[in-house]
Amino acid sequence: MINKSATIIALTAILIVSSFFGITKLQNSINNTNNNDPIDEFTQNAGYYQLDFIESQLSDGSFSAILKWIPSPNEIELKTSPVIRDLRATFQVDANDECEFKITDLNNSRFHLPENEPYPYTKQRYSKKQKEFNLFETEISQVGQKFYFELRRKSTQEVIFSTKDYPIYFTDKYIEVSTQMKDSMIFGLGDRRTDFLLKSGKYSLWARDAADVDNGTPGKEIYGFHPMYLRRDIINNQFQVTLFRNYYGMQVDYEQNSHLTYKVIGGNIDFKFFIGDSNPETSIKLYHNYANGWILHPFWSSGFHQCRWGYQNSDMLMDVWDNFNKYGIPFDSLWTDIDYMYQYQDFTIDFERFNITQMQQIYNLSDSRGVHWSSIIDVGISLDSYAAQKGLDMNVFIKSAKTNDTLVGKVWPGETYFPDFNHPNSTEFWYEGLKNVSSFGIIQDGIWIDMNEYSNFVNGEIVPDQNKKTKPFLTSDLSSSLPFNPLGDQEIEYHTLSLDAYHYSGQDGILYNSTNGYIPTQYDLHNLDGFGEGIATYKAAQKLGKKLTFILSRSTTVGSGKYVQHWNGDGFSTWEYMKLSIPSIMNFNMYGIPFNGDDICGLMFNATAQICARWQQLGSLYPFARNHNNADASSQEPYVFVDHPYVLSSTIKTLNVRYQLLKFYYHLFVKANGVGTIFRPLFWSYPSDDNAYQYETQFMIGDYLMAAPVVEGGDEIKETTHSCVYIPKQAVFYSFYDYTEYQEGEHCYEVPFDSVLPLYIKSGKILHIQDKNKVLRSRFLDNRFSLLIALDQNNYAEGSMLTIDDYNNDENIISNCVEQQNCIVDIKAQGNMGEDNSSFTVDLRIQKEKINTNFQTVIIDKIVVIGIKVDGKSQSKTIFLEENPLIVDGGEIQLDLQFQI
């Protein structure tokens, strides 16, 4: 949710957005004490680290070495950040395809996060711990020489990571380390709106309340903190993941096909490597396993969601609800933004504006028209609220280093406190607050945690002056002492908390146990604020009885996927933002939060009919699909574009497709079992096709479906857009709608505004869909399916499906499908043409995926065989089984289908 105080300024251009928006800041006067000049002066004259001696070596390739700083005669010490002169470099083999390289001070005394829950840590896996079985090998400098470290893939000798030609600097508050990047392309590296293939530039990593498009200029990072990238070796077509396990603010300077440099304001050098193969999914799964995997969402949240900041009372909610029901628009949840709160105070409802009887009617799931209630909880706690007093009594708020009292900032309700989610009482405090919301007679099914970077309407904090009045305190002593600002020209404390604000420091801290008496500050934990809130919210939701949780968090970091889901945050109703939503969702699939989406039709500015229609089409296949709007913009519910009826008709058609696919889509999440991607780039399925890397707006759903959304404007008179789809080399796809065959190459066509999302089935795949009747709520989808069998060149296809009949009961899913439980059957089909070329046989087999597969009753009553080749042309055949359906309820099933063509 955007900084809503910006409503006092007209949205005439992006550059005129209020500074409270937290989006684009006009920097008329900035205290520029944090500039790069001291760093330039230091690095131009600095010495280097020498390999002093090898401390230890193990048979698996692990080693430990001591480094000593050799100063330069002209060295100029950073005044506030002295060089750490003695270091320990270690390389550890964790598995044959997983390893870690670290540089720390000799006592490893600098602030760093533990390698255990809730943080990512190395899992014990079967691995032959001998050097000859490793997929990698290392090289380091000789004793007495300038230190370098190089990691290579053993089979190809590709360099995965190498500091050989680059300096290493390790000071108290500035660290610099580089690696070569020859013959490579990389993806990921932070929460940002940009192309999927990362271009050359300077990229900040710092959790910020912003909606920028990142063009490679420092200070354009947005809400989350994910210092990992997927790298492709272009020459050998091999993939690997590198995680820089450092949570401090940083700037990454990247030059394509040359090098990548990390410039960090604290911590240690700590790299974790996951060595994959020619399939990018391999190394991503290794990374997800390390990052503790991701949680499964409840099935209902897979449906469509409607939201707006600006539904100011329950009458407005009733109007939206009535119209969705009137026009037959499928949806599962109607959201409330901060409007529903009493004076924007967390854990409250303003009953003068929101009639509880109306709310209970809308959110009554026993009524066929009822929908789920999802609502926002902001992190700032109003000083005037009951929750503030409760939090003070429990001592759970972040403290000011200036006053040694509770830090005061400013958000929607005015002056606020901020929970310290390191405090052992914070989880109970958060639970009590969320329990209060559920005590009013309606249940908060989806929990939306926002502003958790932490976002603050003043820079730093508010402190009293000598006259007991208040004023913003703009910079802290700590931030002004930093020799480097990873945000470039933007102040690092801009619209967030003072970096010297301190957190709980006891040995029972939730995020950090201060066993050595160290007091963690915002400098240390800023990029973990949203992570901490996500954990507390997850624990509270479980305590409130939610089995499968749906928690939408704006700020995330490495490992957040185990607790929360995510959306891309605030954006504008433009073609550019719509287009860039696709790589953002792909990134978060890599980061381990695959249930992710963007604000359909855009949050800010007035969405045109054409943009909204195309965005509804695209958003129909987001993993998380929500139309969300800003109070200052024109309404954008699908039915409001009365002069352009194609918005409504297209939305209904494309959402009907979503609901046909809903159980298929959900089964991909269940089958993945918490690791791997769902919403993927085209090249994921075709990594050896160099052309596939150029089509960033086409995407795959699993390895089954390919979408080619229209993301550019079209002819307003003809109401069509000329668009193209690329079919990769040696691939065959079929239209999801009419089964037309598409072979390799680019195919162009006109797509009407009143259309559905161009969608294609990959040959060799079997989809299970539900295409019988229009369904307006996910809970009314039955257990009857159609199989779409898309044959490959060998007349073969395969797929899978769930064996459960009730997706609405979380306990049913957990007890049958999650973790060690299995509810998957594999489906395989082999076709054969008759000798007379007039008959065709399909041998269909359904068998349990694992020996412990659990079964309920699933019914298959229609089969469509696609891609039957007759005289070189594709035909399809539909077989109806209503009178004698195929019952899947245990054991192996074999069915021979023979038909004339």
Image (cartoon, rainbow, N blue to C red):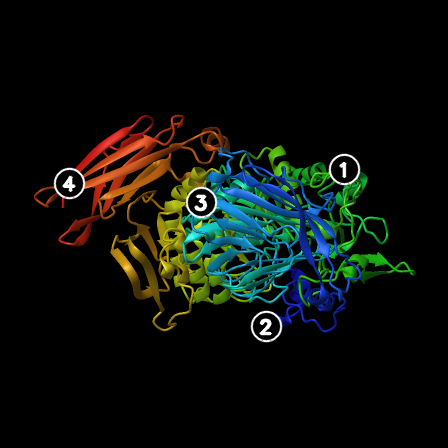
Q: Which amino acid does label 2 sit on?
A: Ala
* Label ID, residue 899: 4
Cα separation between marks 3 and 4: 40 Å
Quadrant in the picture for the N terminus: bottom right
Q: Mark 1 points at which residue?
A: 515
Mark 3 vs 4, N-terminal side: 3
Q: What residue type is labelled 3?
A: Thr
**Relative to 482, does residue 864 appear above or below in the rendering?**
above
Q: Is residue 589 left or right of residue 438?
A: left
In this rendering, the label closer to the viewer, 1 or 2: 1
* Label ID, residue 282: 3
Residue nearer the viewer, 306 or 721: 721
Q: At 74% across and 35% down in the image, what residue appears?
A: 508
Residue nearer the viewer, 715 or 437: 715
Q: What element carries label 2?
A: loop
Q: Where is residue 41 in the image (x, y as percent from the top left)?
A: 73, 68
Residue nearer the viewer, 415 or 82: 82
Q: What element carries label 1?
A: loop
Q: Are marks 1 and 2 in contact (CB under 8 Å)?
A: no
Q: Is residue 877 left or right of residue 203?
A: left
Crowd rating for badge 2 (residues with CA inside 10 Å; few <14, some 14–19, many 20+): few
- View extreme (right): residue: 466
Crowd rating for badge 4 (residues with CA inside 10 Å; few <14, some 14–19, many 20+): few
Cα separation between marks 4 and 2: 62 Å
Residue 240 visible in the snapshot: yes
Q: Name the residue under label 2.
A: 13
Mark 1 vs 2, N-terminal side: 2
**Quarter holding residue 413:** bottom right
Q: Where is residue 578 in the image (x, y as percent from the top left)?
A: 48, 62
